[in-house]
Every structure is written in C-alpha cells, then in structure tokens.
Image (cartoon, coloured by chain):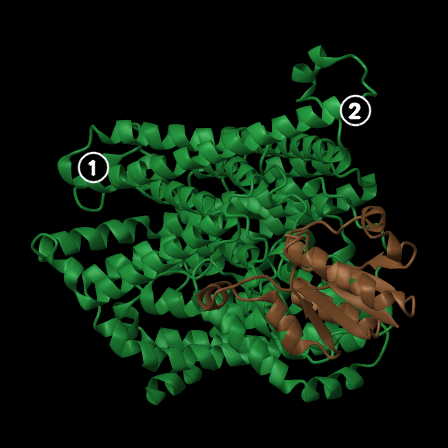
Amino acid sequence: MTIVVAYADTPPGHAAVAAAVAESTRNRETVIIVPAVRGDAAPDVGELETRWPDIAGRVEVDRGDLGDPSDNVIQVAQRRDARLVVLGLRARTAVGKLVFGSTAQRILLDATCPVLAVKPTVADG
Amino acid sequence: MTDAAFSALASLADPSLLLMLAIGVLAGLVIGLIPGLGGTGAVAILLPVTFGMDPEPALAMLIGALAVVHTSDTVAAVLLGAPGSASASVTMLDGYAMARQGQAKRALSLAFLSSMAGGLIGAVGLTLAIPLARPLVLSFGSPELFMLTVLGVSLAAVLSRGNVVKGLTAGFLGLLLGLVGTSPTTAEERFSFGSLFLSDGLSLVAVALGVFGLAEIASRVGQRRVAEKPVELTGGWASGIREWLTHWTQVIRGSLIGIWAGILPGVGATAGTWLAYGQAVATAKDKRKFGKGDPRGIVGPESANNSVEAGDLIPTFLFGIPGGVPSAMLLGMLLTYGIQPGPAIVTDHLDLMYLIVWAFAIASIAGAFLCFLATGSLAKLTRVPFAVLGPGLLVVMLLGAFQESGQLGDLWVMVALGVAGFFLKATGMPRAPFLIGFVLAIPMERYYYLTASLYDGAEWMARPGVLAFAALLVVPVLWSLIKRLRGASGAADDGHRDEHENVAAAGDELEGSLAGTPWSAAVAVVAVFLFGGALWVSGSFSEEARLMPRLVAVCGLVAALVLTWQEARVNRRRAGRDAVKDAREPAGGSGATMLATRVEPRVDTPALTRHHDLVIAARTFAAMAAFLVLVMVGGYAAATLVFTPVFLLYAARTRPRTAIIYTLVLGLVLLSLPSLLPVDLPLGALQ
C-alpha cells in the first residue's frame, strides 16, 4: 500500500510528512510526495531522505499531470491506489478561505480514500 | 425578433453569401491546421480580402473562418503533439496521449463533435444575448458608452495572463497608438509629425498583422522542428461518436464556460479552454486518466474553445467592447463600414446580428463535417515546418495590409510593429490589451466629448450605469491588490483553482522567455520614453485635442514607471542571485574580483536559446525589410519571385525543387488574385 502526502515547504507541510512517516513505518509502505503549492518546485528526494531518514528508500515524488495542486494530489492518490492521503492544515479565517479558497478543503471533499489532516505542533512552527 | 432571425436565414440562401461562407470555412480550417495562427491569424489574413465587399458577405466569410479555426487546430495537437493554436494545447494533453495508444480517430471524433456542439451552443448563447442585452444597450447614453470603452481596455489589461502592470502599459501603448492621426473633435493632426500618411491614422490591419502576424512568423521561423513522426490515424470513428454522446453534460458545461470566458475581455480562447479543462477535472470523481487519454479532457475544452469565439462576439457587437483579439479586428472592420456597434447595431442592423449567428452555426456544422472527411489528407499539412510557410504567409499578410490604404508606408509600419510585437511577446507583455486599446482609442475619445458637452461638470458620473461600471472597474484592482499584499506576507497557498501554470508550460516556447531579463527592462524604459515624449508633444495641441492624449500619456507614464521599477528590482535580484551562485562555485577559482564581471555572460541554456531566438528574429525582420525594399524597386510580384526562393533556400534550407515550385505557385496566385478578388498589388519604381 502507499501513502500520499500533499507537500508544502511550510510547518504544516512538514507536519504532514512527519505524520506520514509515522503511519508508514509499521508496514513499510511507500510514501509519495505530491507538491501541493502552485509554483513550487518539486522537492528533491535526497533532501527528503536526509530530513526524514526513516523513509529513506521508499519515498517518491510525483507531480501528477494536472494544473491544480489539489487535483494532482487526488490524481496521484487514485493512480497509486493510496491507502491514505496526509495533508497539513494551517490557520485560516472564514473570510480568508472565502476569498482565497482552500486546497486542503478540496482534497478533503474530493478524495476517494481516507484523508488524515494534521496541524503543526508548536515545536515545528 | 424572430422575424429578423428568419429573414437573416433566408438571406443566407443567397448563393453569393453561401459561397463566401464556404470560402471562409475552408480558409479557417486550413489556417487552424497551421501551427501558431489561430483565430487571430484567420481574421487578420481574411480581413484584407473583404475590403471592397458589402458588410454581409464580408461578415459571412470572417465568421465562417472564426467559427471553425478551433475545430481543425485539434488535428496537429492530437496527431503531432504540437498544437495548431495555443488553445489546442489543452486538447493535446489527453488527445495526444489517446492517439499514441492507437486511438487517434477516437480522439479526433470526440474533438470534432465537441467543437461542433460548442459552436452551436455558442451561437445559441449569442442569439439569447441579443434580446437580453437589447433593453440594457438601448438605455445607454454616451457616459455609459464611454465607461464601457474604459472598462474594455482596463479589464483586458487586468484579466490578461501575467503581470497587471504589464497589461496596463500595453493597453495605454495601444491607446496612444490609436490616437495617432486626425483628432475626431477638432480635426487637428496629432502625432503625425507632419507626415500626410500618418495623419490618416494607422490602419487596423497593419497594426494587427504586425503585432500578431509578423511577430508570430519571426518567433516561429526558428522554432525547433518537430522531429517526431505523426501518430498513425487509427481506431474507429464510430466508437468515438457513440462515446461522445455519453459525455453530453461535459459538452454543455464546457460550452457555457467558453461563452463566459469569451464575454470577459482579455480572457481569450486559451484561458477559457484551460478553465474548461480544470472544470472537467474538478468535477470528475475518477481523476486517474487525466493527462493519459481521458475523453473528458478532450470533450470539455474542445467545446469551450469554439464557444469562446461566439462569446467574444457578444460584448463586441452589443456593447462595442471586443472580448478578444479576433473580435477587436471584427469591430474595426464594422467601424470602417460605418456600422457603430452598441445601440446602433441593435436598432438598425439587427439582421446583421442574426446573419452572424446563423453563419456561426452553419460554419460549425460544416467545419466538423469537413474535418471528418478530410483529416487524413489535411494532416500532412501539419508537418510542414513553419520556416517553409513563412515567406508565403509574409507575402499574403503584407499584401493584405496594403489593401486598406494602398500605401507602402503601411507596410513599413507593419514591419516596425512586428518588431515591437515580437518584443512584447518575448518579454511577456500581453498583446490583447494593446490591440483592444488601439481599436477603442477613437470611440473612447468621441464618447468622452459627447459626455462632456451633454452634461454639466461631473453630473454624468452619478448616473447609475456609470457607477455600476466604475464598481466593475475597481473590483479587479482591489483584487490584485489583495493578492499582492498576501503574496508579500508570505502566504504560500493560493488555493484557487486556475491552470495558468500549465498555460506557460504547454503554450509557446517564446512567450515570456525574455521576461525578467535586461531586455524586458529595456522594453519598460522605451515605454517610459514613448509616454514621456507623447506628453511633451501633446503640449502643442489645442485645448480640446490635448485632453485625451495627455490623459493617456500621464496614466501610461505612471504604469510604465511602475513597470520599470519592477523590472529593475527583478534584474537586481537576479544579478544578486547569480553573483551568489558564482561565489558558491569554487570551480572558477579566480576569486572575488571576477564576480562583478561574470554576472552577465554566464553560459546557461535558457540564455543560449534566448540568444538564438533573438538572432533568428532579427534575421527574419531584416529579410522582411529587404523584401519591402524590393517591392519599392520592382513591384510586388517581382519582389515575391526574388524573395521567396532566396528565403526558402537560405533561411528555411529547403531543396531547390521545393523552392522553385513554391515560388512559381505563389507567383501564379499573386498574378491571378487581382482578377478573382478586389485586390491591388503594390507597384514598384521600375514599373
């Protein structure tokens, strides 16, 4: 089985990877990192492995084929038949979400597998 | 209302109108197949042919072409993986993937049928828009019409892809260019510098063909050729047709998105098509196959790119503000016939509106039908490298620009604007607001004077219509401000669905390739000087004639200065980054003294391709200028016979046999054209 992470180079994004690492160790599942911020470069596998040595050797990066990051996350999750999607949440006011939309919300609503939403701990932030 | 609709249909039974429609459809299909031309190219190339015709046949031909351009542009995208126009690059994602799986016919039949349905639904949308907008349009006075022109230019600038400041600068440059010539209020000559030729104003065809057509030729002649063999045309038509029927909801949704994108100024076929693709992905439960050959990825976008062209026509004809580049040219054409879009077209020329609707619908059906019949043979056209098509297109475009005024000066203006268009394109300045500004400059000034003379002081600003438009004007500005503020605060997730990133990736190689380099800073500085110069020159005009140029120049100056500041900042940051990179690379080993000098001549691949593109563009424009000199000396036909083989042999590097046959055919066409169509060839000094 595989676990897909909606990745961002931010505290919530790192918390998501950390959660995915914890989830995947038991069955040594593959962790697939999908960049979920528009315009961000895909993270380097080597860098991810040094940062989270637990998943070395079973981490992949997949961009998906679509333009919208939330679509990409879901597409990759469906293609790889993922067991779980992990994403990090950040604080948003109601107005802020109304104006700027939310990638996380769309993943939560559209995903066809369970989704684990995590928040950064104070230490991470 | 229905009477007018059916009498318009009856008028289409006139064989000459039908013939023009058929010619338009055929031309549109062929132009769609050629990569890089699209709707803009179709209207620009056909527009000159229509000079001297009545408005009805002229519109039948142009609308026929416009309606089918996006039907045939799919062929290259699906079979070759190289889109026939920017908007077909969306279809390419899933269409090309499907074709490589041996289902080219399935992909094409889905695309053709969707294009047809998109065109039909677009025509229905256009029909419904007429009675809906009629009372609104009739309630407009000159203050509202003035606000509409302002709204047209500024929305085009704001909604165009990329930087808002760049869009505004381009829009003001277009307005300024549109003001060249005789002032409509005081019959005073402005920016003509004593030249009789400039006092007529610049010809629309010369501007449009220069900024879009010639710039396109120059940027594509050097394009890396497609080495891949086209995919075999395999699979069955029937299965695609049956499958298409099951996706009817996607067709309707795609078409509606297309119409909406068309109505908004500055959101053209490309952005509208991406919106439709995004919508298809977002509403699909199973997203696995998108990008790998999902039929829904073909059906929605293909419906949208045809209905965009119909949607574009709604604001163009009803409000007089063009929704895109092709419709800006149509608007210019109507103005030369003395048909004022807006209230006048709704009251006096309703039959013309319905003629357009019918022509659009009939052309959509005929275009799809012809595509089914002829794709096998037409697909070969898509393999011709652009360098070979270049001289033929150049000859046709220059000949077209000559028709409006019959002056060679127009052709020089066109080549000069071609250079300008090339730099606008390469530095990522949107060219749509530029052309829309050019077309709307004179109506804007005229409506302003009407308003100022009919109302006391600022009383007109309190009219409800004006207030509503002003609100529309302010909202996008606020929106971009909020975005900017948020971008500055470092928030990473813009969570709104849009596909712009892909547009840049899958679209044109050249588009914006010079952005953020000293070149684009230079473009900004040139704009500052143009506006500054215009401001200075306008000081000598009379009170009345001065107002509009001054307003445009001041606003343009502000926009251009902001742009220059932005560019300077980007360049400084870039230089800083490069210096840091160099410092980190110990390989050079020559120490800190080298740092300052090594910033510029870094050898990296993008810089090399940029250099390569620039050299080729410079050579192409030099060739165009040489051609014009030849025309001045020996006349058009002789110049063509000399220029074409030389260009083909040395620039396109074709075989001599191809060059000779090509030249002979082109020469024959040129010689026979004047007897078939109302076209004049420029004469040289020796003739």
B189 in relation to B352, above or below:
above
**The disc label shown at residue B585, or none:** 2
Q: Are marks 1 and 2 in contact (CB under 8 Å)?
A: no
Q: Is residue B41 left or right of residue B662?
A: left
Q: Return the residue nearer the eye: B14 or B44.
A: B44
Q: Position of residue A55 (x, y in %)?
A: 87, 57
Which kind of residue does numbered mark 2 sit on?
A: Glu
Chain A appears what colour?
Answer: brown
Among the chains pictured, the one given green colouring is B
- Which chain letter matches label 2? B
Residue displayed at 40% across by 82% down: B128
**Which structural element holds mark 2?**
loop
Q: Return the residue nearer the eye: B14 or B173.
A: B173
Which kind of residue does numbered mark 1 sit on?
A: Arg
Q: Return the residue nearer the eye: B507 or B670.
A: B507
Q: Disc 1 or disc 2, which is closer to the eye? A: 2
